[in-house]
Image: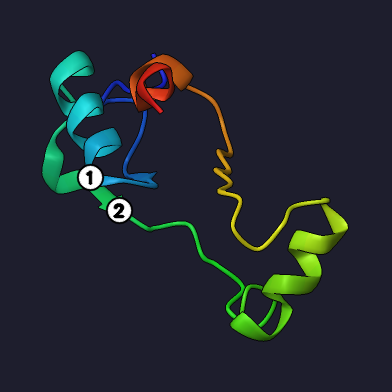
Amino acid sequence: RLFSPDNTRHIIANSRRGADEITRWYGYPRDRISVVYNGVDVERFSSGQREAARAELGLSPGQRMILLVGSGWKRKGTRYA
């Protein structure tokens, strides 16, 4: 009922894929969905703080790290990461 065009005037999705899935799975009109991407605090994640954050996590400069936030792990393909 949440995605019924009769019940909801407009939907905000955080990705084009999410908007496309709402249209495909629920038949919601695509022109009534806006995509607003998640923001990133560029000051917090600037290169000036990168090494301090890695040290806090116990990571050496050469180690790789992947951060995944949210849900829908299967859809995001984390199995392949």
Q: Are marks 2 and 1 in contact (CB under 8 Å)?
A: yes
Q: Nearer the viewer, residue 59 or 33?
A: 59
Q: CA distance from mark 2 to mark 1?
A: 6 Å
Q: Amino acid at mark 2?
A: Val
Q: Residue furthest right?
A: 56
Horizontal side of residue 81 vs 41, given as left or right: left
Horizontal side of residue 18 vs 23, given as left or right: right
The residue beneath circle 1 is: 16
Q: Going 35% across and 21% down the picture, which residue do you hit?
A: 80
- In the rendered view, tell whether residue 60 sits above or below residue 13: below
Q: Going 80% across and 72% down the picture, which residue do you hit?
A: 52
Q: Amino acid at mark 1?
A: Arg
**Could you tell me which secondary element the residue under label 1 belongs to?**
helix
Check the picture and name the quadrant holding the C terminus: top left
Q: Going 58% across and 39% down the picture, which residue do you hit?
A: 69
Q: Going 48% across and 57% down the picture, which residue do you hit?
A: 38
Identify the colour scheme used. rainbow
Give how far across and how far down residue 48 sits, in percent: 68, 86
- Rendered image: mark on residue 35: 2
Give the quadrant of residue 45: bottom right
Give how far across and how far down residue 79 sits, in percent: 41, 16
Horizontal side of residue 55 vs 31, given as left or right: right
Give the class, few, some or many, for how many residues have Cα within 10 Å of label 1's Cα (few <14, many ≥20). Answer: some
Q: Nearer the viewer, residue 60 or 42?
A: 60
Give the quadrant of residue 36: bottom left
Disc number lying in front (2 or 1): 1
**Could you tell me which secondary element the residue under label 2 belongs to?**
strand
Give the class, few, some or many, for how many residues have Cα within 10 Å of label 2's Cα (few <14, many ≥20). Answer: some
| Sooner in the amino-acid sequence: mark 2 or mark 1 | 1
